[in-house]
Amino acid sequence: MPTDLPPPTRRVEKKRTVFGVVLNTCMVVSALALTFMVLVREQGYANGQPGYFAGALTSMMQQTAVDSSDESQVLPPD
């Protein structure tokens, strides 16, 4: 069964602008940098190294442990 297709047209290539090239370059570089950062952190976790916030969480837990001593707390009157 024959089909009646329009004749192929010549495609016009888009002109590349400096802004487009710079934007695409920044996107590729940032994607590679983020991938590298994720892989480095994953390697650290695999080796048992604590994360960035582990030290802060540990110090907060130690402070709350010190605060919960045998000292009596002052209660407001009813």
Image: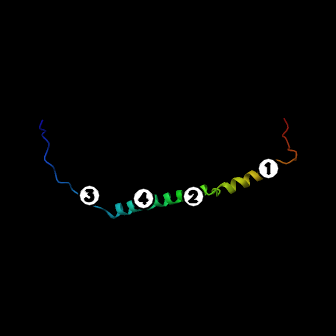
Instruction: Tell me which numbered mark, 1 or 3, is placed earlier along the sequence.
Output: 3
Question: Residue 18: where, in percent of width, then height?
Answer: 34, 64
* Amino acid identity at mark 4: Met
The residue drawn where x is 50% and y is 60% is: 36
Instruction: Tell me which numbered mark, 3 or 4, is placed earlier along the sequence.
Output: 3
Residue 65, disc: 1
Q: CA distance from mark 1 to mark 4?
A: 46 Å
* Amino acid identity at mark 1: Ala
Q: CA distance from mark 4 to mark 2?
A: 24 Å
The residue drawn where x is 69% and y is 53% is: 57
For numbered disc 4, what is the local secondary structure?
helix
Q: Is residue 27 placed above or below 75 in the rendered structure? A: below
* Residue bearing mark 3: 14
* Amino acid identity at mark 3: Lys
Q: Are marks 1 and 4 in contact (CB under 8 Å)?
A: no
Q: Nearer the viewer, residue 3 or 17?
A: 3
* Residue bearing mark 2: 43
